[in-house]
Amino acid sequence: MNATTREKVEVVSFGCRLNLVESEAMRRAAEAAGHTNVVVFNTCAVTSESVRQARQAIRRFSREKPDTKIIVSGCAAETERAAFADMPEVAAIVGNAAKTEPETWRALLCGEAPVSDIAQARIAQPIAVDRIEGHTRAFLAIQNGCDHRCTFCVIPYGRGPSRSVPADIVIAQAKKLVELGHKEIVLTGVDLTSWGGDLDGAPKLGSLVRAMLKSAPGLKRLRLSSLDCIEADEDLFIALAEEERLTPHLHLSLQSGDDMILKRMKRRHSRRDAIEFCARVRDLRSDIVFGADLIAGFPTETHAMAENTRRLVDDCGLTHLHVFPYSPRDLTPAARMPQVAPAVRAARAKVLREEGERALVRHLDAQMGTRVEVLAERGGVGRTHDFSLVATPGVEAGAMIEGVVAGRDGMKLRLA
Protein backbone atom coordinates (compact mmCIF):
# COMPACT_ATOMS: atom_id res chain seq x y z
CA MET A 1 0.00 0.00 0.00
CA ASN A 2 1.31 3.44 -0.93
CA ALA A 3 -0.16 6.77 0.10
CA THR A 4 0.39 10.08 -1.66
CA THR A 5 -0.83 13.02 0.41
CA ARG A 6 -1.62 16.55 -0.71
CA GLU A 7 -3.55 19.39 0.90
CA LYS A 8 -6.54 18.79 -1.37
CA VAL A 9 -6.44 15.15 -2.51
CA GLU A 10 -4.89 12.07 -0.93
CA VAL A 11 -4.48 8.82 -2.84
CA VAL A 12 -3.97 5.41 -1.23
CA SER A 13 -2.69 2.93 -3.79
CA PHE A 14 -2.67 -0.85 -3.50
CA GLY A 15 -1.06 -3.45 -5.74
CA CYS A 16 0.91 -3.09 -8.95
CA ARG A 17 3.14 -0.42 -10.46
CA LEU A 18 0.46 0.39 -13.01
CA ASN A 19 -1.79 1.37 -10.13
CA LEU A 20 0.94 3.70 -8.86
CA VAL A 21 1.04 5.51 -12.19
CA GLU A 22 -2.74 5.74 -12.36
CA SER A 23 -2.97 6.92 -8.76
CA GLU A 24 -0.77 9.91 -9.49
CA ALA A 25 -2.79 10.68 -12.63
CA MET A 26 -6.03 10.50 -10.63
CA ARG A 27 -4.66 12.79 -7.95
CA ARG A 28 -3.69 15.40 -10.51
CA ALA A 29 -7.00 15.13 -12.37
CA ALA A 30 -8.99 15.42 -9.14
CA GLU A 31 -7.06 18.48 -7.98
CA ALA A 32 -7.32 20.11 -11.42
CA ALA A 33 -11.09 19.60 -11.33
CA GLY A 34 -11.27 21.41 -7.99
CA HIS A 35 -11.74 18.54 -5.52
CA THR A 36 -10.78 19.24 -1.92
CA ASN A 37 -10.77 17.14 1.23
CA VAL A 38 -10.95 13.92 -0.79
CA VAL A 39 -9.18 10.58 -0.46
CA VAL A 40 -9.08 8.10 -3.33
CA PHE A 41 -8.49 4.41 -2.64
CA ASN A 42 -7.05 2.77 -5.76
CA THR A 43 -7.65 -0.91 -5.01
CA CYS A 44 -6.19 -4.25 -6.10
CA ALA A 45 -8.08 -7.51 -6.70
CA VAL A 46 -5.24 -10.00 -7.19
CA THR A 47 -5.98 -11.78 -3.91
CA SER A 48 -8.85 -11.81 -1.44
CA GLU A 49 -6.37 -10.47 1.12
CA SER A 50 -5.69 -7.36 -1.00
CA VAL A 51 -9.43 -6.68 -1.16
CA ARG A 52 -9.79 -7.20 2.59
CA GLN A 53 -6.91 -4.81 3.25
CA ALA A 54 -8.52 -2.13 1.09
CA ARG A 55 -11.87 -2.41 2.89
CA GLN A 56 -10.11 -2.34 6.26
CA ALA A 57 -8.09 0.72 5.26
CA ILE A 58 -11.24 2.54 4.13
CA ARG A 59 -12.98 1.90 7.45
CA ARG A 60 -9.92 2.95 9.43
CA PHE A 61 -9.50 6.15 7.42
CA SER A 62 -13.16 7.02 7.84
CA ARG A 63 -12.90 6.65 11.62
CA GLU A 64 -9.81 8.85 11.74
CA LYS A 65 -11.04 11.50 9.28
CA PRO A 66 -14.84 11.27 9.18
CA ASP A 67 -15.23 14.55 7.30
CA THR A 68 -13.13 13.46 4.31
CA LYS A 69 -14.94 12.26 1.20
CA ILE A 70 -13.90 8.73 0.19
CA ILE A 71 -13.83 7.64 -3.47
CA VAL A 72 -12.91 4.09 -4.48
CA SER A 73 -11.39 2.98 -7.77
CA GLY A 74 -9.15 0.19 -9.07
CA CYS A 75 -9.59 -3.47 -9.89
CA ALA A 76 -11.43 -4.47 -6.72
CA ALA A 77 -13.88 -1.64 -7.35
CA GLU A 78 -14.59 -3.27 -10.74
CA THR A 79 -14.80 -6.89 -9.64
CA GLU A 80 -16.58 -6.22 -6.33
CA ARG A 81 -18.33 -2.96 -7.12
CA ALA A 82 -21.50 -3.71 -5.14
CA ALA A 83 -19.57 -4.63 -2.00
CA PHE A 84 -17.67 -1.33 -2.02
CA ALA A 85 -20.71 0.70 -3.03
CA ASP A 86 -22.61 -0.72 -0.04
CA MET A 87 -19.96 0.50 2.39
CA PRO A 88 -21.43 3.54 4.21
CA GLU A 89 -17.98 5.16 4.24
CA VAL A 90 -17.77 5.26 0.41
CA ALA A 91 -19.18 8.30 -1.40
CA ALA A 92 -18.52 7.20 -4.99
CA ILE A 93 -17.05 4.46 -7.17
CA VAL A 94 -14.87 5.30 -10.19
CA GLY A 95 -14.34 2.52 -12.72
CA ASN A 96 -10.97 1.62 -14.22
CA ALA A 97 -12.00 2.56 -17.75
CA ALA A 98 -12.10 6.30 -17.15
CA LYS A 99 -10.45 6.84 -13.79
CA THR A 100 -7.55 8.95 -15.09
CA GLU A 101 -9.63 11.14 -17.41
CA PRO A 102 -10.21 14.77 -16.33
CA GLU A 103 -13.88 14.59 -17.44
CA THR A 104 -14.53 11.90 -14.85
CA TRP A 105 -13.35 14.08 -11.98
CA ARG A 106 -15.20 17.15 -13.26
CA ALA A 107 -18.41 15.11 -13.38
CA LEU A 108 -17.86 13.83 -9.85
CA LEU A 109 -17.47 17.39 -8.63
CA CYS A 110 -20.94 18.09 -10.02
CA GLY A 111 -22.41 15.13 -8.18
CA GLU A 112 -22.46 12.77 -11.14
CA ALA A 113 -21.02 9.26 -10.94
CA PRO A 114 -19.78 8.27 -14.40
CA VAL A 115 -20.52 4.67 -15.33
CA SER A 116 -18.27 2.86 -17.81
CA ASP A 117 -17.93 -0.77 -18.87
CA ILE A 118 -14.31 -1.91 -18.67
CA ALA A 119 -15.11 -4.88 -20.93
CA GLN A 120 -15.84 -2.42 -23.75
CA ALA A 121 -12.55 -0.51 -23.42
CA ARG A 122 -10.58 -0.64 -26.66
CA ILE A 123 -8.04 2.20 -26.39
CA ALA A 124 -5.21 2.54 -23.90
CA GLN A 125 -5.33 6.08 -22.58
CA PRO A 126 -1.79 7.52 -22.41
CA ILE A 127 -0.95 8.56 -18.86
CA ALA A 128 1.53 11.41 -18.61
CA VAL A 129 3.06 11.26 -15.12
CA ASP A 130 6.46 12.88 -14.78
CA ARG A 131 7.07 11.91 -11.16
CA ILE A 132 5.53 9.76 -8.42
CA GLU A 133 6.09 10.91 -4.87
CA GLY A 134 8.36 8.54 -2.97
CA HIS A 135 9.84 7.00 -6.12
CA THR A 136 13.06 7.91 -7.92
CA ARG A 137 12.49 5.72 -10.95
CA ALA A 138 9.96 6.81 -13.56
CA PHE A 139 7.12 4.42 -14.36
CA LEU A 140 5.78 4.51 -17.90
CA ALA A 141 2.48 2.72 -18.55
CA ILE A 142 2.47 1.32 -22.09
CA GLN A 143 -0.25 -1.35 -21.93
CA ASN A 144 -3.43 -2.19 -20.06
CA GLY A 145 -5.83 -5.12 -19.81
CA CYS A 146 -5.40 -8.80 -20.64
CA ASP A 147 -6.87 -11.14 -23.27
CA HIS A 148 -5.83 -14.34 -21.48
CA ARG A 149 -8.00 -16.23 -19.05
CA CYS A 150 -5.77 -17.93 -16.51
CA THR A 151 -8.09 -19.93 -14.31
CA PHE A 152 -6.92 -18.27 -11.07
CA CYS A 153 -6.94 -14.66 -12.24
CA VAL A 154 -9.71 -12.10 -11.83
CA ILE A 155 -7.73 -9.20 -13.30
CA PRO A 156 -9.17 -9.39 -16.87
CA TYR A 157 -12.56 -8.63 -15.29
CA GLY A 158 -11.07 -5.58 -13.61
CA ARG A 159 -8.88 -4.34 -16.45
CA GLY A 160 -10.71 -5.35 -19.62
CA PRO A 161 -9.12 -6.44 -22.92
CA SER A 162 -5.48 -5.86 -23.82
CA ARG A 163 -4.79 -2.46 -25.35
CA SER A 164 -1.54 -0.71 -26.16
CA VAL A 165 -0.26 2.86 -26.15
CA PRO A 166 1.15 3.59 -29.65
CA ALA A 167 4.94 3.57 -29.99
CA ASP A 168 5.28 7.21 -30.97
CA ILE A 169 3.44 8.32 -27.84
CA VAL A 170 5.50 6.01 -25.62
CA ILE A 171 8.76 7.26 -27.12
CA ALA A 172 7.72 10.90 -26.74
CA GLN A 173 6.84 10.29 -23.09
CA ALA A 174 10.18 8.53 -22.50
CA LYS A 175 12.14 11.42 -24.02
CA LYS A 176 10.28 13.89 -21.80
CA LEU A 177 11.05 11.81 -18.71
CA VAL A 178 14.74 11.84 -19.60
CA GLU A 179 14.62 15.61 -20.15
CA LEU A 180 13.12 15.95 -16.67
CA GLY A 181 16.17 14.21 -15.24
CA HIS A 182 15.04 10.62 -14.74
CA LYS A 183 17.88 8.14 -15.06
CA GLU A 184 15.73 5.01 -15.06
CA ILE A 185 12.38 4.25 -16.69
CA VAL A 186 10.33 1.18 -15.84
CA LEU A 187 7.88 0.01 -18.49
CA THR A 188 4.64 -1.16 -16.88
CA GLY A 189 1.47 -2.89 -17.96
CA VAL A 190 -0.93 -5.67 -17.04
CA ASP A 191 0.40 -8.04 -19.71
CA LEU A 192 3.50 -6.24 -20.92
CA THR A 193 4.61 -8.73 -23.58
CA SER A 194 1.24 -8.45 -25.32
CA TRP A 195 2.05 -4.80 -26.13
CA GLY A 196 1.37 -3.99 -29.77
CA GLY A 197 -1.03 -6.82 -30.54
CA ASP A 198 -3.95 -4.41 -31.02
CA LEU A 199 -1.98 -1.79 -33.00
CA ASP A 200 -1.56 -1.53 -36.77
CA GLY A 201 1.01 -4.07 -37.93
CA ALA A 202 0.99 -5.79 -34.50
CA PRO A 203 4.49 -4.62 -33.44
CA LYS A 204 6.24 -6.49 -30.64
CA LEU A 205 7.63 -5.28 -27.33
CA GLY A 206 11.23 -5.83 -28.45
CA SER A 207 10.85 -3.37 -31.30
CA LEU A 208 9.51 -0.74 -28.91
CA VAL A 209 12.38 -1.31 -26.47
CA ARG A 210 15.00 -0.91 -29.19
CA ALA A 211 13.30 2.19 -30.60
CA MET A 212 13.06 3.79 -27.15
CA LEU A 213 16.74 3.25 -26.38
CA LYS A 214 17.74 4.64 -29.76
CA SER A 215 15.49 7.69 -29.41
CA ALA A 216 16.54 8.47 -25.84
CA PRO A 217 20.35 8.22 -25.76
CA GLY A 218 20.43 10.09 -22.45
CA LEU A 219 18.48 7.37 -20.65
CA LYS A 220 20.78 5.47 -18.28
CA ARG A 221 18.51 2.50 -17.61
CA LEU A 222 15.39 0.94 -19.09
CA ARG A 223 13.76 -1.72 -16.93
CA LEU A 224 10.91 -4.07 -17.82
CA SER A 225 8.28 -5.12 -15.33
CA SER A 226 6.67 -8.58 -15.31
CA LEU A 227 7.04 -10.59 -18.54
CA ASP A 228 5.39 -13.70 -19.93
CA CYS A 229 8.33 -15.81 -21.13
CA ILE A 230 6.36 -17.54 -23.89
CA GLU A 231 5.58 -14.17 -25.53
CA ALA A 232 9.16 -12.87 -25.72
CA ASP A 233 9.99 -11.88 -29.31
CA GLU A 234 13.26 -11.99 -31.23
CA ASP A 235 13.82 -8.23 -31.03
CA LEU A 236 13.60 -8.48 -27.25
CA PHE A 237 16.31 -11.15 -27.23
CA ILE A 238 18.44 -8.94 -29.48
CA ALA A 239 17.93 -5.97 -27.18
CA LEU A 240 18.96 -8.01 -24.15
CA ALA A 241 22.10 -9.12 -25.95
CA GLU A 242 23.11 -5.74 -27.40
CA GLU A 243 21.68 -2.99 -25.19
CA GLU A 244 23.61 -2.55 -21.96
CA ARG A 245 21.14 0.10 -20.83
CA LEU A 246 18.36 -2.52 -20.82
CA THR A 247 18.76 -3.71 -17.26
CA PRO A 248 19.82 -7.35 -16.69
CA HIS A 249 16.78 -8.04 -14.54
CA LEU A 250 13.62 -9.74 -15.76
CA HIS A 251 10.65 -10.56 -13.57
CA LEU A 252 8.77 -13.54 -15.00
CA SER A 253 5.14 -14.52 -14.59
CA LEU A 254 5.82 -18.24 -14.03
CA GLN A 255 3.27 -19.13 -11.31
CA SER A 256 4.22 -22.83 -11.10
CA GLY A 257 6.96 -25.28 -11.98
CA ASP A 258 4.67 -28.25 -12.55
CA ASP A 259 3.26 -29.01 -16.00
CA MET A 260 -0.08 -30.36 -14.78
CA ILE A 261 -0.68 -27.33 -12.58
CA LEU A 262 0.35 -25.00 -15.41
CA LYS A 263 -2.20 -26.73 -17.62
CA ARG A 264 -4.91 -26.38 -15.00
CA MET A 265 -3.97 -22.73 -14.62
CA LYS A 266 -4.34 -22.35 -18.42
CA ARG A 267 -0.86 -20.91 -18.64
CA ARG A 268 0.64 -20.97 -22.11
CA HIS A 269 4.12 -22.12 -21.16
CA SER A 270 5.48 -25.39 -19.83
CA ARG A 271 8.14 -26.01 -17.21
CA ARG A 272 10.60 -26.71 -20.02
CA ASP A 273 9.68 -23.44 -21.78
CA ALA A 274 10.56 -21.49 -18.63
CA ILE A 275 13.88 -23.25 -18.13
CA GLU A 276 14.87 -22.90 -21.79
CA PHE A 277 13.92 -19.21 -21.80
CA CYS A 278 16.12 -18.50 -18.78
CA ALA A 279 19.00 -20.50 -20.27
CA ARG A 280 18.76 -18.65 -23.59
CA VAL A 281 18.72 -15.23 -21.96
CA ARG A 282 21.62 -16.18 -19.70
CA ASP A 283 23.63 -17.18 -22.76
CA LEU A 284 22.93 -13.75 -24.26
CA ARG A 285 23.44 -11.79 -21.04
CA SER A 286 25.67 -13.46 -18.48
CA ASP A 287 24.80 -10.91 -15.76
CA ILE A 288 21.04 -11.48 -16.04
CA VAL A 289 19.04 -11.88 -12.83
CA PHE A 290 15.54 -13.38 -12.82
CA GLY A 291 12.64 -12.71 -10.52
CA ALA A 292 9.36 -14.60 -10.66
CA ASP A 293 5.79 -14.73 -9.41
CA LEU A 294 4.95 -18.13 -7.92
CA ILE A 295 1.65 -19.41 -6.52
CA ALA A 296 1.70 -21.94 -3.69
CA GLY A 297 -1.14 -24.38 -3.09
CA PHE A 298 -3.05 -24.03 -6.34
CA PRO A 299 -6.13 -26.33 -6.39
CA THR A 300 -5.23 -30.04 -6.86
CA GLU A 301 -1.54 -29.35 -6.17
CA THR A 302 0.14 -32.35 -4.53
CA HIS A 303 3.34 -32.39 -2.52
CA ALA A 304 5.25 -33.65 -5.59
CA MET A 305 3.82 -30.83 -7.71
CA ALA A 306 4.82 -28.29 -5.08
CA GLU A 307 8.31 -29.75 -5.09
CA ASN A 308 8.51 -29.19 -8.86
CA THR A 309 7.84 -25.51 -8.24
CA ARG A 310 10.44 -25.35 -5.47
CA ARG A 311 13.03 -26.97 -7.74
CA LEU A 312 12.26 -24.41 -10.44
CA VAL A 313 14.09 -21.81 -8.36
CA ASP A 314 17.37 -23.63 -9.04
CA ASP A 315 16.45 -24.94 -12.48
CA CYS A 316 15.72 -21.44 -13.79
CA GLY A 317 18.23 -19.67 -11.53
CA LEU A 318 15.61 -17.42 -9.92
CA THR A 319 16.68 -14.75 -7.44
CA HIS A 320 13.89 -12.28 -6.58
CA LEU A 321 10.68 -14.19 -5.75
CA HIS A 322 7.15 -12.91 -5.25
CA VAL A 323 5.34 -15.82 -3.57
CA PHE A 324 1.57 -15.88 -3.13
CA PRO A 325 -0.49 -18.53 -1.35
CA TYR A 326 -3.32 -19.37 -3.74
CA SER A 327 -6.38 -17.18 -3.13
CA PRO A 328 -9.79 -18.29 -4.48
CA ARG A 329 -11.40 -15.48 -6.45
CA ASP A 330 -15.04 -15.30 -7.46
CA LEU A 331 -15.64 -15.44 -11.24
CA THR A 332 -12.61 -17.71 -11.78
CA PRO A 333 -12.71 -21.44 -12.71
CA ALA A 334 -10.00 -22.31 -10.17
CA ALA A 335 -12.32 -21.31 -7.33
CA ARG A 336 -14.53 -24.26 -8.31
CA MET A 337 -11.67 -26.79 -8.40
CA PRO A 338 -10.78 -29.08 -5.45
CA GLN A 339 -9.03 -26.78 -2.99
CA VAL A 340 -5.81 -27.28 -1.05
CA ALA A 341 -6.23 -26.63 2.67
CA PRO A 342 -5.32 -23.05 3.66
CA ALA A 343 -2.74 -24.27 6.19
CA VAL A 344 -1.04 -26.34 3.47
CA ARG A 345 -1.03 -23.36 1.10
CA ALA A 346 0.61 -21.23 3.77
CA ALA A 347 3.20 -23.90 4.56
CA ARG A 348 4.11 -24.33 0.89
CA ALA A 349 4.37 -20.56 0.47
CA LYS A 350 6.75 -20.47 3.43
CA VAL A 351 8.94 -23.15 1.82
CA LEU A 352 9.08 -21.17 -1.44
CA ARG A 353 9.92 -17.93 0.35
CA GLU A 354 12.73 -19.62 2.24
CA GLU A 355 14.05 -21.07 -1.02
CA GLY A 356 13.92 -17.60 -2.51
CA GLU A 357 15.77 -16.09 0.44
CA ARG A 358 18.56 -18.63 0.08
CA ALA A 359 18.83 -17.87 -3.65
CA LEU A 360 18.94 -14.12 -3.00
CA VAL A 361 21.63 -14.51 -0.33
CA ARG A 362 23.76 -16.55 -2.77
CA HIS A 363 23.35 -13.84 -5.38
CA LEU A 364 24.21 -11.00 -3.01
CA ASP A 365 27.22 -12.82 -1.59
CA ALA A 366 28.51 -13.35 -5.14
CA GLN A 367 28.64 -9.55 -5.56
CA MET A 368 31.39 -9.12 -2.96
CA GLY A 369 34.33 -7.23 -4.41
CA THR A 370 32.54 -6.27 -7.61
CA ARG A 371 32.06 -2.70 -8.78
CA VAL A 372 28.41 -1.67 -9.12
CA GLU A 373 26.43 1.35 -10.22
CA VAL A 374 23.59 2.30 -7.90
CA LEU A 375 20.61 4.57 -8.42
CA ALA A 376 19.82 6.03 -5.00
CA GLU A 377 16.23 6.07 -3.85
CA ARG A 378 14.54 7.58 -0.83
CA GLY A 379 15.06 6.00 2.55
CA GLY A 380 18.82 5.52 2.28
CA VAL A 381 18.72 2.66 -0.21
CA GLY A 382 19.26 2.21 -3.93
CA ARG A 383 19.20 -0.40 -6.68
CA THR A 384 21.89 -1.80 -8.94
CA HIS A 385 21.26 -2.68 -12.58
CA ASP A 386 20.19 -6.17 -11.55
CA PHE A 387 17.81 -4.85 -8.87
CA SER A 388 19.99 -5.76 -5.90
CA LEU A 389 19.26 -3.54 -2.91
CA VAL A 390 22.15 -1.38 -1.67
CA ALA A 391 22.47 0.80 1.42
CA THR A 392 23.09 4.42 0.36
CA PRO A 393 23.14 6.46 3.60
CA GLY A 394 23.53 10.17 3.01
CA VAL A 395 23.15 9.92 -0.78
CA GLU A 396 20.56 12.17 -2.36
CA ALA A 397 17.63 10.35 -3.96
CA GLY A 398 18.03 10.29 -7.75
CA ALA A 399 21.81 10.36 -7.65
CA MET A 400 23.70 7.60 -9.44
CA ILE A 401 26.85 6.45 -7.67
CA GLU A 402 29.48 3.76 -8.15
CA GLY A 403 31.30 1.70 -5.58
CA VAL A 404 32.79 -1.65 -4.68
CA VAL A 405 30.63 -4.08 -2.73
CA ALA A 406 32.27 -4.57 0.67
CA GLY A 407 29.65 -6.60 2.51
CA ARG A 408 26.03 -7.43 3.13
CA ASP A 409 23.71 -6.29 5.91
CA GLY A 410 20.77 -8.64 5.77
CA MET A 411 19.40 -8.37 2.24
CA LYS A 412 21.17 -5.08 1.48
CA LEU A 413 24.62 -4.73 -0.03
CA ARG A 414 27.10 -2.34 1.55
CA LEU A 415 29.62 -0.32 -0.46
CA ALA A 416 33.20 0.31 0.59
Image (cartoon, rainbow, N blue to C red):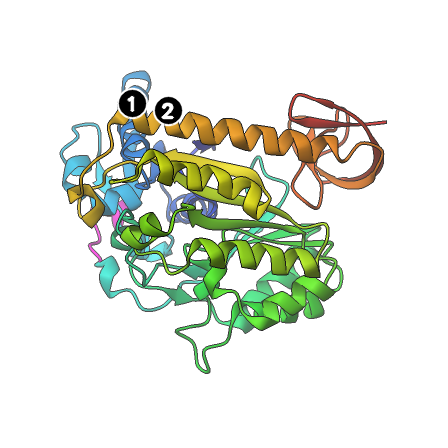
- Observer able to see residue 12: no
Question: Which residue matches tag 2?
Answer: 347
In the rendered structure, which segment of residues is drawn in magenta? 106-116
| Left or right of 203 on screen, residue 374 | right
Which secondary structure lies at badge 2?
A: helix
Find residue 308 and report its image quarter.
top left
Answer whether labels 1 and 2 touch (C-beta < 8 Å): yes
| Left or right of 365 on screen, residue 273 | left
| Left or right of 257 on screen, residue 204 | right
In the picture as drawn, the residue positioned furthest to the bottom comes out as 201
Say if the magenta span includes residue 232: no
| Residue ID at (32%, 17%) | 64
Q: Quadrant of the N terminus?
A: top left
Q: Nearer the viewer, residue 218 or 302?
A: 302
Q: Amino acid at mark 1?
A: Ala
Q: Main secondary structure of the magenta part?
A: loop
Q: From this view, report whether residue 203 is shown above or below residue 226.
A: below
Residue 355 screen position, x and y as percent: 53, 30
Residue 162 screen position, x and y as percent: 36, 64
Residue 172 screen position, x and y as percent: 60, 67
Residue 111 screen position, x and y as percent: 21, 45
Question: Which residue matches tag 1?
Answer: 343
